[in-house]
Image: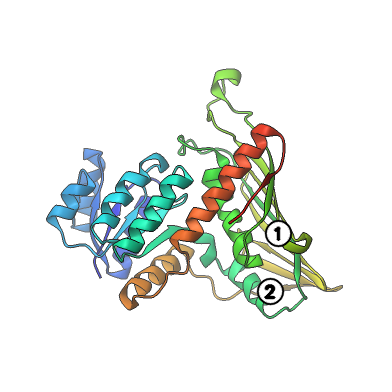
Amino acid sequence: MKAAVAGTGSWGKHHLRVLNDLGHLDSFVEMDNERRIFYEKKYSIKGFSNINDLINDHDIDIVNICTPTITHFEIAKTTLSNGISTLVEKPLTYSSSQGEELVNLARDNKAALTVGFVERFNPIIINIKENLQKQTFGDPLLIEFQRENRWAGVTKDIGVILDSSVHDIDGARWLFNEEPNIVFARTGNVLNPKSTGFVGTDYEDFATIILGFKNGKTAIIIANWVTPYKVRKISVTCTDGNLSGDYMSQEIRQDDGTSVTIPTRKYEEPLVNELTSFIHAVESNTSPVVTGLDGLNTIKIAEAAITSAKRGSPIYLDL
């Protein structure tokens, strides 16, 4: 199974590393000449300046797209139109209309399409999912997510919702095993360079999103690029107890009146598990863990959150 990576920036370089370790790295696309030469030498593979040259020159089974969000659609449109199974880093596309087109292209060309929601493969959230499936503490009622750290200066074409909150929007959908029917959000931009002089982004850099599900179930998603240290936490309140996890320390706590810290499964790099899982799905012609529809619906929810924040009112969903 031969895989290529489009984009070798801050996250794409990790796709190169993992695919190389797995023995599936064949080639890559990188517009920057200096970076392209560097990775050609590092991995002894051929690099191309654009996706069309790669496809015309190489017989590729999988392409991982790790370029800026605004470029996802055109690159994925090219790969899927050529019947190449494609992993698109989150978010799937810049808009849901583009996402809809990619989902249809994948179906029509019998190509697998997945989205890089790497947290689905994090031992913490897998442990929580397994406990919810076993109803260890009854039914889930409330899920709270925290995803905070100072803006790193890498993401410049989208705000914190499409860049970061999408992980937890997808996580809420997955843990509740259903789609939300209402969304309300509050956002702001405190590091806007035009008004503050800070080095920041023109998009929202902090957001609180409330997702409403059937029977009053709720997810609260807090994300920002303002907090000067990294926070990655989840808490699930159930009818008979609570589950909480720290993605950073890989500690998970169960509390049904007596709080207990329990070990998670042996830690494995989520990206390794994600790419291994997708390669297996392509090889076995089975549905990937994260589908194109998962990516599309997550964008629709994120768009609704952005609209809600602008209007100051909730948005009802029909997914």
Report the side of 34 relative to 239 (left or right).
Answer: left
Q: Residue at x 37, y 53 (%)?
A: 102
Using the image as rendered, state which of residue 146 and residue 76 is in the foreground.
Answer: 76
Mark 1 and mark 2 lie on one chain; the one further toward the N terminus is 2
Q: Residue at x 19, y 50 (%)?
A: 47
Q: Quadrant of residue 1?
A: bottom left
At label 2, counting other C-alpha atoms closer than 10 Å, the crowd grade (few under 14, some 14-19, many 20 or more) is some
Q: Which residue is situated farthest in the bottom direction here?
A: 134
Using the image as rendered, state which of residue 123 and residue 74 is in the foreground.
Answer: 74
Q: Residue at x 32, y 51 (%)?
A: 76
Q: Quadrant of the C terminus?
A: bottom right
Name the amino acid type tagged 1. Phe
Q: Which residue is situated farthest in the right direction here?
A: 257
Give coordinates of residue 214: x percent, y percent: 73, 62
Query: Which scheme is used to colour this image of the protein?
Result: rainbow
Residue 126 visible within the image: yes
Dot 1 corresponds to which residue? 213
Give coordinates of residue 96: x percent, y percent: 48, 47
Asked if residue 265 is positioned above or below residue 59 in the image, the reply reads below
Report the side of 187 relative to 85 (left or right).
Answer: right
Using the image as rendered, state which of residue 215 and residue 35 is in the foreground.
Answer: 215
Q: Nearer the viewer, mark 1 or mark 2?
A: 1
Name the amino acid type tagged 2. Leu
Dot 2 corresponds to which residue? 132
SS label for mark 2: helix
Q: Residue at x 25, y 38 (%)?
A: 32
Question: Decide: marks 1, 2 in contact (CB < 8 A)?
Answer: no
Q: Which residue is situated farthest in the left direction here?
A: 57
Residue 224 visible within the image: no
SS label for mark 1: loop
At label 1, counting other C-alpha atoms closer than 10 Å, the crowd grade (few under 14, some 14-19, many 20 or more) is many
Asked if residue 299 is positioned above or below residue 116 in the image, the reply reads above
